[in-house]
Image (cartoon, grey):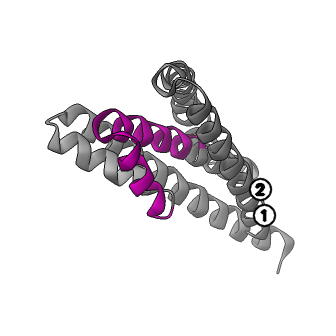
């Protein structure tokens, strides 16, 4: 499990770096035009990751020899879903409440833009936007939970095999 926690720290550092790059890119260019391009790319990546999760990682999670690899895959997926949900929250908040709404969301530990995006979408009667953000958050936490659960099982399997 310590290997998985180490990988998680690396992924967190990469995610924070990507968040800063996204914010700098968004603030130095036409924010909405930049987000439309980024949103298209991220949507494609999320679609691919979803199908990889379903068709590759889910079956790998059931076999002892491939559980650790599946746990790493689930963990990477959770961060990809997290980046996508965070970016969608920024776009929704920015479109509805503007820069002050984004700033308020960023002040809430950086992840508050998802919550402000949900609230802004609901207040603007854009229910599909709120549902998209809620489903995104469920994917983030669900895949992260799966990564930890499968990783824990892989750790138990390796202890049983080594006789510890």
In front of the other: 112 or 44: 112
Judge from the rendering whether residue 163 lies leftward or rightward of residue 92; answer left or right: right
Q: Quadrant of the C terminus?
A: bottom right
Dot 2 alpha-carbon crowd within 10 angstroms: few under 14, some 14 to 19, many 20 or more: few
* Above/below status of 115 relative to 149: above
Judge from the rendering whether residue 24 lies leftward or rightward of residue 112; answer left or right: right
Dot 1 alpha-carbon crowd within 10 angstroms: few under 14, some 14 to 19, many 20 or more: few
Which quarter of the figure has residue 25?
top right
Q: Position of residue 38 (x, y in %)?
A: 56, 24
Q: Which residue is mark 1?
A: 6
* Count of numbered labels shown in the rendering: 2
Judge from the rendering whether residue 24 lies leftward or rightward of residue 50; answer left or right: right
Q: Position of residue 14 (x, y in %)?
A: 73, 48
Picture residue at 72% right of the left edge, 66% below the top? 5
In front of the other: 37 or 53: 37
Viewer can see residue 138: no
Q: Which region is colored magenta?
A: 80-109
Secondary structure found at label 1: helix
Secondary structure found at label 2: helix
Distance in Å between CA atoms under marks 1 and 2: 6 Å
Q: Position of residue 128 (x, y in %)?
A: 23, 32
Q: Which residue is mark 2?
A: 10
Asked whether the residues under the numbered discs 1 and 2 touch, taking CB atoms below 8 Å apart as contact, a structural biologist would say: yes
Picture residue at 35% right of the left edge, 48% below the top? 101
In front of the other: 50 or 159: 50
Viewer can see residue 6: yes
């Amino acid at each position: 499990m310590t290997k998985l926690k180490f990988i998680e720290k690396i992924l967190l550092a990469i995610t924070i770096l990507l968040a800063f790059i996204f914010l700098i890119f968004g603030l130095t260019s036409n924010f909405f035009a930049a987000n439309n391009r980024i949103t298209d790319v991220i949507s494609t990546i999320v679609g691919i990751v979803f199908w990889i999760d379903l068709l590759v990682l889910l079956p790998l999670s059931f076999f002892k020899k491939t559980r650790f690899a599946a746990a790493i895959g689930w963990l990477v997926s959770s961060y990809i879903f997290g980046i996508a949900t965070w970016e969608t929250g920024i776009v929704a908040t920015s479109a509805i409440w503007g820069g002050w709404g984004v700033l308020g969301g960023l002040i809430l530990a950086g992840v508050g833009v998802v919550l402000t995006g949900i609230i802004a979408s609901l207040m603007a009667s854009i229910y599909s936007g709120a549902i998209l953000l809620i489903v995104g958050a469920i994917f983030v936490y669900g895949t992260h939970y799966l990564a930890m659960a499968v990783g824990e099982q892989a750790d138990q399997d390796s202890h049983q095999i080594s006789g510890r």
